[in-house]
Amino acid sequence: MAKVCYSCKKGPAFGQSRSHSMVATKRRFDPNLQKVRILVGRSPKRVYVCTRCLKAAKVTKAP
């Protein structure tokens, strides 16, 4: 699954998990992506869009 938003190109961020003893292990912060049908030009297309773009109405959902 592509972990990139179709609208804003937001992708995964990387960081570290810290245990109680402060040992660092690598981890990945994935964006909240949803697979939705949107209008691209005049035809509907099924793409991954982050929830922030859906809430802000940056894409128009296909009927």
Image (spheres, rainbow, N blue to C red):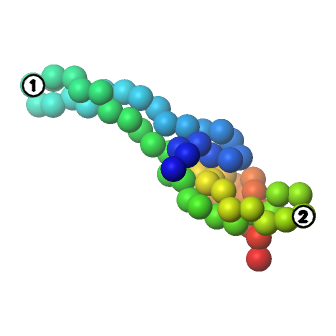
Q: Is residue 3 visible?
A: yes
Left or right, residue 56 beside residue 13: right
Dot 2 crowding, Cα within 10 Å, few <14, some 14–19, many 20+: few
Where does residue 14 sit, x and y in percent of width and height? 41, 29
In this view, the residue in front, 26 or 57, is 26
User: Which amino acid, mark 2?
Assistant: Arg
| Residue at the image position 56 percent from the left and 59 percent from the top | 34
Marks counted in the figure total 2
| Figure quadrant of residue 40 | bottom right
Q: Nearer the viewer, residue 56 or 61?
A: 61
Residue 17 lies, in percent from the top left, at 26, 31
Q: Which residue is farthest left?
A: 21
Task: Estimate the spatial distance between the alpha carbons at disc 2 and disc 1, rounded to whole Å.
Answer: 55 Å
Q: Which mark is residue 1?
A: none
Residue at (22% x, 23% y) in the render: 24
> Dot 2 corresponds to which residue?
42
Does residue 47 lie above or below 8 as drawn?
A: below
Other residues around mark 1 within 10 Å, as few (<14) / some (14–19) / many (≥20): few
As drawn, 27 above or below 33: above
Q: Residue at x 45, y 43 (%)?
A: 30
Residues tagged 2 and 1 counted as in contact (Cβ below 8 A): no
Q: Secondary structure at mark 2?
A: loop
Please give the label number shown on residue 21: 1
Q: Nearer the viewer, mark 2 or mark 1?
A: 2
User: Among all residues in the image, which is located at the extreme bottom?
Assistant: 63
* Residue 10 placement, left or right of 59: left
